[in-house]
Amino acid sequence: MRTEIAKPQGVSNMPHDLPVTATPPAPRLPDIMAICRAAGADDVAFVELNRPRLAAQRDGILRAIPWAKGFMVFARRLNRHALRSPMRSISSAEFTSGGHDVKEIIHKTVRDLEDAGVRSLGISGLFPFEFSRSDGPPFVVPLKILAEEAGLGRMGKNRMVLHPRFGADLYLGAIALDVSPQDEEAGRPLSESPCIDCNMCAVACPTGAIAKDGHFDFGSCMTHNYREKVGGFVEWVHTLADSKNRHDYRRRVSDTETLSWWQSLGYEANTHCDYCVAVCPAGDEAVSFLADRKPHFRDVVGPLRERAETVFVVPGSDAEAHVAATYPHKKIRHIGSGRSPASIANLMAMLPLVFQRGRSQGIAARYHFRFHGKETMEATVDIRDQRISVSPGLEGKADLVVRADSEAWLGFLRHERKLPWELLRGRIRLRGSPARLKEFGRCFPG
Ligand code: SF4
Ligand code: SF4
């Protein structure tokens, strides 16, 4: 709002003079959140950037948004019954619409805030991402952590932020603000999780990525659910490039799959799964679910479990074993992981996410990695009791020491360089039994 005030004496009356205006006071946080709600957000909360839990990400966030003091985080509710349809075209359309809503809310809120004199900038948490980043994850802010810290929800067993009312049926967005909150204006983490530990997500997950004991196999989920996004796209392009001709391509990729790619590229990326969102009864449905689980299982979980579909897995992965044992009516489709770490730092961050604990059975070993060349890093990887830990520096006594030129090692992982040749040239050296390296590779197929 612009307020006209009387012109001070002695000020020229030249025709090109602009009207003198008084700047209205900047809106307070409750007013800012009301603007976001008016733009379509279903729930809104604020979190300051100086929270201890954001310490690891703070420098990266400030490099991208130097003036940010905090984030207004919001939830946009998705239509539950569409997400639950066994026809994934229906759920994909709902996810797509929700994504558009989030971007629209951000766009409108930021424009209104700019008019009100508040510096702000929106981050949808949806594509596009920063894929060229080699020093960290490809997103600008850790949206799930922001949402938890703001008190919008807590992460459930399915790794989704569960809202106390909307459960998993939501999309998140965030708006960076150059505003400090007054006392009590910032949100606080929820004291109780909306996750009711019902295990419906684990029961419905076709790849076994969600285990009832809380373990999450990020790699298997990415391979299947993200088949037509991120890593899956890279793998498909490699398949295209490797195909000798049309017949060879059709031997590798069915026409149905090619049409699905066309939909994803021409329209918006299809979701292949998201069953863990569809079946989650957290939120305002939890009470009726707990009173009688049968209708939910009959109408929602059962149809997704029974669905005849293709499940994308990396050969030799835990997901492959899970589909074969649990879903004999689903078709296993082998694909490459499409993983191609851009740096050693990236690789080390990725290891715990793609670790296959089923494949690691019987392994108890400590590995020292010493990288030199373009990237210098020392790290210890410990695998035992079907768990992995990755720590910086060299800890304890190693069963295998790998000294490698960073580019040679990344090239070997990308299948661009042969290990025997790199060993011969001395660009990769091993101290310890090579069988240990084979065991290590077993835990990270693809
Ligand atoms: S389905 Fe059940 S266990 Fe899984 S996240 Fe939702 S409430 Fe938690
Ligand atoms: S998206 Fe699908 S594969 Fe991934 S965790 Fe959820 S149910 Fe499992």
Image (cartoon, rainbow, N blue to C red):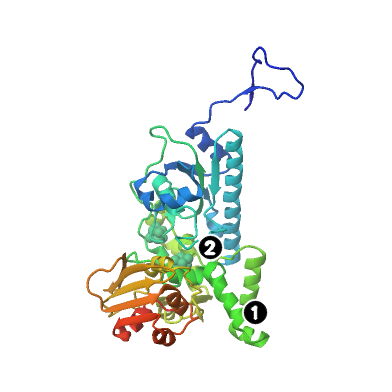
Residue 378 visible in the current orientation: yes
Label drawn at residue 131:
2
Of all residues, the one furthest to the top in this rendering is 9
Q: Residues within 10 Å of mark 1 (few under 14, many from 20)?
A: few
Q: Residue at x 63, y 83 (%)?
A: 249
Q: Position of residue 189 (x, y in %)?
A: 37, 45
Q: Residue at x 52, y 70 (%)?
A: 231
Q: Position of residue 100 (x, y in %)?
A: 61, 53
Q: Which residue has dot 1 on it?
A: 255
Tell us which disc is closer to us: 2 or 1: 2
Residue 270: image quadrant is bottom right
> Relative to residue 334, is residue 152 depicted above or below?
above
Residue type, numbered disc 2: Phe
Q: Earlier in the sequence, mark 2 or mark 1?
A: 2
Of 166 and 35, nearer the camera is: 35
Residue type, numbered disc 1: Asp
Q: Position of residue 203 (x, y in %)?
A: 40, 68
Dot 2 lies on which element? Answer: loop
